[in-house]
Amino acid sequence: MSARFTLARAAGATAAGLSRLTGRGGGTTIGGRVTLLVDPSALATAAAGRELALVSGTNGKTTTRTLLVAALRTKYDVVSNAGGANLPTGLTAALTRDRTSRVGVLEVDEPFMPQIVTAAHPRALVLLNLSRDQLDRYAEVHRLAGIWHRSIETDFDGTVVANVDDPLVAWAAQPAQSVIWVAAGQGWTHDSTSCPSCGDIIERPASGVWRCRGCGFSRPAPQWLVDGTTVEDAAGQRHEVALTLPGQVNVGNAALAAAAASVWQVPPADALDAMAAITSIEGRYLETTFQGRPVRLLLAKNPAGWSEALQMARPSAPTVVAVNARAADGRDPSWLWDVPFETLQGRFAVATGERSRDVAVRLRYAGVEHVRVDDPAEALRAAHGGGPVEVLANYTAFQPYRKVVARG
């Protein structure tokens, strides 16, 4: 280990500590940034000699990373990043902070995946899905699929665990020397209507089937299958998935995590049992109370995620819809018109967040009874109708609700 890396690691730890002492946050980002400023190769040095899994996709990165960490910890000590720190700075901070764990799981922001593959030489990539998200930062989703495809083709010799139901992911994973295809499902298909290979139309003649009308590119045969709440592994063994986390989408995430854990020879039954103990993931799916009333927090960041969150919401429960449009959320909230808010008809909603007016207009056109309230605590109080309250919020709008319910 070089003296420069040792100095960089110490400088990063000092910066992180000062950030925490001055109340400016957990110090993850600034610690990693300082480390990389002192030693630009620190990420590669910190990753050397480890067996890493990288998890990437538009939706479900944090959840799948957490599930995979739980599975791998049945056999290994595992280093991981948390708190949404999925850029090179956050990954560097995680790997330099823990220098003993030889196995690691890192969630990676989609466009940065090739950079991390080059630096970290991971053993496995877990590719979840690709859909529109923060278009002001990431541009068109086919571009991201192309970035992944080229990285795997030119710079990766490990195993890809890929969601076979997303044509963009399947095409990106094609060049890999080893692929574990998982039928994890794809509820949102609006962003994969054209072939990433030739540009012609993707046809879906039956459930679980897709193919390109032009070049013939089609859904690979899956080795792992999700059937309701059951997962069938590569050996043909069926496992009932008893997650505490809600939603069919999380059964798919669990299947992808279990398939990835099998690369490290973790038995599927052990992996899925470990995942069943997880009740909340960094506040996502948290069930708590506010002034004696049950509240559940659901994070949703883009049309695909909002569609899944709306399906998870309890029928008839009053719903708080909180939307910001900061850099971390994406500056353009026009995606609100792609979200099926019509499913909230017949229940009461509260429009809130910095873009509450945009939300209120969308709810009005969706035929949803609602009020507009800016303050998070007041928004929870305004959710009349009795019973539990569902809070659906995008990234930066989500954090104030975690603080409000923590205060009670």
Image: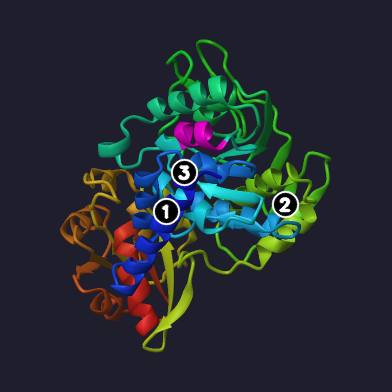
Residue 196 in picture, x, y percent from top left: 46, 21
- The quadrant of the image that shows the C terminus is bottom left
Amino acid residing under circle 3:
Ala
- The reply to whether the C-beta atoms of the residues labelled 1 and 3 are less than 8 Å apart is no
Residue 289 in picture, x, y percent from top left: 43, 82
Q: Is residue 125 above or below residue 215?
A: below
Q: Is residue 16 above or below residue 177?
A: below
* Depth check, front residue: 254 or 67: 67
- Nearest to the eye among marks 2 and 3: give it: 3
**Residue lying furthest bottom in this view?**
292
Q: Residue at x 40, y 26 (%)?
A: 142
Q: Is residue 401 above or below residue 190?
A: below
- Judging by the rendered image, the residue that carries numbered circle 1 is 85
- Judging by the rendered image, the residue that carries numbered circle 2 is 230
- The reply to whether the C-beta atoms of the residues labelled 2 and 3 are less than 8 Å apart is no
- Judging by the rendered image, the residue that carries numbered circle 3 is 42
Residue 11 in picture, x, y percent from top left: 39, 56
Secondary structure type for disc 3 = helix
Q: Is residue 167 left or right of residue 407?
A: right
The magenta span reads 113-120
Q: Is residue 354 left or right of residue 99?
A: left
Amino acid residing under circle 1:
Ala
* Depth check, front residue: 219 or 143: 143
**Residue lying furthest top in this view?**
215
* Depth check, front residue: 18 or 242: 18
